[in-house]
Amino acid sequence: MSRGRKLSKDISYRDKKIVERYNSALDTMPSLAKRYGISKQRIHEILKRAKTLGYVIKKQNLSKRYHDFHQCEVCKKILKIAQKDELMTKSELTQMLNIDVGICNWHLDRLKGSGFISKKFATIRSDRLVKALRCYKYDSLSPAAVGRKFGYKNFYSILSYQNKKGINLERIFRLQTVPELKREEQMAISN
Ligand SMILES: [Zn+2]
């Protein structure tokens, strides 16, 4: 006599991940469907089954006007990243967060709208430009040298354009390995 398919008492590792990502607002049902290559209906079923097995499924309020940044895993991560470095492309950011670009934008819009982060954060599209601006910002190279390194003929005008746009380009030299006394010398040379 066949006993048929034994009903498992727990959900699979993948389904646990799905619940986790859904609850922490890293993904919505449509973006989960895309991520795991299954239908939205299937995601819905997985969440429903998880709930019957005792998992907490937090209803997401992605359409809600008010958004609690301090409770939001995505926003917390974005704030942390933005604090470290304003210069990055949107694709870099979405890769770091491992989320869908649409979701990333949704949280970014809220954070920017509330003034938590600069409106200019993750707005540059070109990887090369971001790398060049980073180099200018953190390495003690002259603008001309940065331009040569990254293949920009007139890096000065790029700098002034980005500056006008509101990108923070205040230079912070990474000279941690240079002893205190020599630091001033080096700054003098680069100026
Ligand atoms: Zn958020």
Image (cartoon, grey):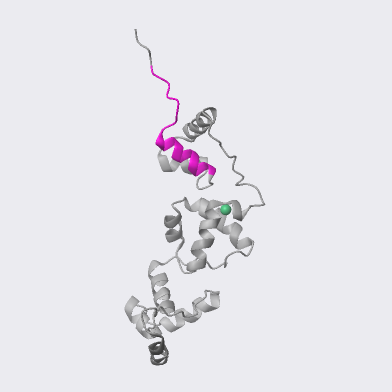
Name which quarter of the figure residue 117 lies in. bottom right
Q: Residue 92: x, y in percent?
A: 42, 60
In the picture as drawn, the residue positioned furthest to the right comes out as 66
Q: Residue 73: x, y in percent?
A: 53, 52
What's drawn in magenta, residue-wise?
Answer: 5-23
Q: Is residue 186 shown left or right of residue 46?
A: left
Q: Residue 143: x, y in percent?
A: 40, 84
In the image, what residue occupies the spot 63% across and 65% down? 115
Taking depth in this image into account, of 151 and 120 the one nearest to the observer is: 120
Q: Is residue 97 shown left or right of residue 119?
A: left
Name which quarter of the figure residue 190 lies in. bottom left
For the image, the number of numbered tags is 0
Q: Quadrant of the C terminus?
A: bottom left
Name which quarter of the figure residue 156 lies in. bottom left
Is the residue 167 above or below the residue 184 in the image? above
Residue 122 seen in the current view:
no
Residue 97 seen in the current view:
yes
In the image, what residue occupies the spot 45% across and 25% down? 9
Is the residue 1 above or below the residue 89 in the image? above
Q: Quadrant of the N terminus?
A: top left
Q: Residue 125: x, y in percent?
A: 44, 65
Taking depth in this image into account, of 178 and 76 the one nearest to the observer is: 178
Q: Is residue 138 magenta?
A: no
In the picture as drawn, the residue positioned furthest to the top comes out as 1
Q: Is residue 18 magenta?
A: yes
In the image, what residue occupies the spot 42% across and 43% down? 35
